[in-house]
Amino acid sequence: MGLLKAIYLLMNASTLAEDWVDKPLELLDKIMTGIRAMLSKTLVEITSIAVEAARLSYVAMAIIGLLLWASGFSPYTGRRLMIGAVILAMVTELLM
């Protein structure tokens, strides 16, 4: 019986070795795929939040700049805020 078992193990040694190596590699591949998907989703969310923050910023800058310029309280600062808002709007909308 021992001889037959030894012959069987020798004949299937390559298959057993491949299974022993392939199983951890498959598991590692699944883990890496999950990490890639999670990082991709996180990057999309961060980009979306950054775009929304930039949009809110340039709208607020334009409104405050317009109020400062139109009221005469600080026309130079108001004009600079409006120019900055236009530049930020162009960069935000063109890049995204």
Image (cartoon, rainbow, N blue to C red):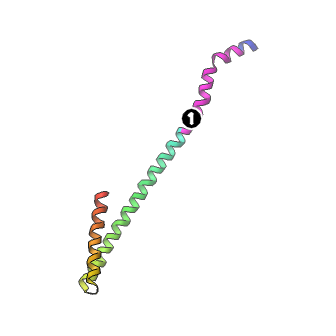
Q: Assess disc 1: are there few (<14), some (14-19) or many (≥20) residues with their C-alpha within 10 Å of its C-alpha.
A: few
> Can residue 67 be seen?
no
Tell whether 29 sits left or right of 45: right
Tell whether 20 sits left or right of 58: right
Amino acid on which disc 1 is placed: Leu
Residue that numbered label 1 is attached to: 25
Residue plotted at (29% across, 75% down): 81
Q: Quick check: is 46 in the magenta stretch?
A: no
Residue 86, position in %: x, y? Answer: 26, 69
Residue plotted at (67% across, 15% down): 8
Q: Label the magenta part by its dominant secondary structure.
A: helix
Tally of marks: 1
Residue plotted at (37% across, 64% down): 52
Residue 29, position in %: x, y? Answer: 53, 38
On screen, 11 above or below 83?
above
Q: Is mark 1 on a helix, strand or loop?
A: helix
Q: Give the range drawn in magenta.
A: 5-28
Residue plotted at (29% across, 70% down): 85
Q: Quick check: is 7 in the magenta stretch?
A: yes
Residue 20, position in %: x, y? Answer: 62, 29
On screen, 47 above or below 34?
below
Residue 46, position in %: x, y? Answer: 43, 58
Q: Which residue occupies the extreme left position in the image?
A: 70
On screen, 66 above or below 44?
below
